[in-house]
Amino acid sequence: MSRRNPTILALVAILAFALGACQGGNSSSSAPALTDPKEIVTAALKSTEAAKSVHLALTLDGTVSVALPIAGGTATPVNLTGTTASADIDFAKPAAKAVFAVPAMLGLAGEVIAIDGKTYLKTTITGPLYQESAASSAPLDPSAAGGVVTNLDALLSKEGVTLTKGDDVTCGSVQCYTVTTTLTPEILGTSASSSLGGLPVDLTGASLALTIRVEKDLPNHLAGLDAVVTMKDGTKLTAGLTASKWDQPVTVTAPPADQVKPAAS
């Protein structure tokens, strides 16, 4: 399932995971309720393909092994407990603006702006000025969003994956379907280079318990995801992602030149 323009997370992101939705919205009373979990997930992924914009909020808790460049690519335990992030994504432009905080990493916090093929990043460690880089080499690249949808669809379509419809739940002011699944290490993959939310996380021997929330109202927006990744050594990473403000106007602009660190000569 590919987007109409593969040049637009992440996110995580980072995620990620990157989301979207169809325009408009008839009420669920005008359409028959979905009962098949695969149909529910498919409806959410289809609405994702038609995305114009979305607001995402992410929370992370737990410790994972990440191959950090500053450590020479060696897997290093990273404590993500209390990590939060939020982003406004314009899929049409494409552009995105996000803020994040990782309290367990010396109070690390920052902001990322991705627009016009460039990404501007500033953190509490790097100082008050943004550092400019190509979007494709930065932690937030809105052009990678479509690939996340495709990867999620392919992952949930693998042989051996069982989707189960759970009880309906309240998502803010609307009702949502829930679909759950557990991906074994064999299904999830054992490559040490596998990524989770854009991070080079070692998923060798890991399993994933996933709960997907999908709005019952048409066009069945993807409302959120809850994921628990259990590593081979028993440690766990818990992630919660919510999505809102479908197709509402998003304004993302590059920072003023005097707020961007000059390129090294």
Image: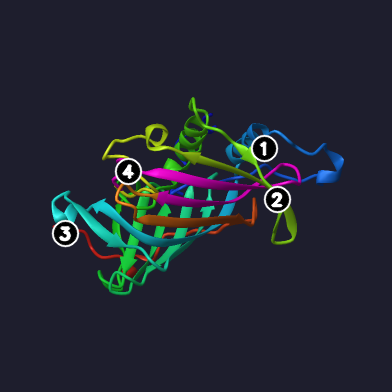
In the picture, measured across the screen, residue 15 lies left or right of residue 30, that is: left
Query: Percent position (x, y) of residue 244?
Result: 62, 56
Magenta region:
201-229
Mark nearer the viewer, 4 or 1: 4
Where does label 3 land, which residue?
264
Q: Nearer the viewer, residue 203 or 49?
A: 203
Identify the mark nearer the N-term, 3 or 2.
2
Q: Is residue 14 visible?
A: no
Q: Nearer the viewer, residue 226 or 131?
A: 226
Where does label 2 land, which residue?
176
CA gap, disc 4 and disc 2: 30 Å
- Whether pointer 3 and pointer 2 mark residues with C-beta atoms closer than 8 Å, the reply is no
Q: Residue furthest top?
A: 159
Task: Find residue 40 and name its label.
Answer: 1
Q: Quadrant of the C terminus?
A: bottom left
Q: Nearer the viewer, residue 161 or 14?
A: 161
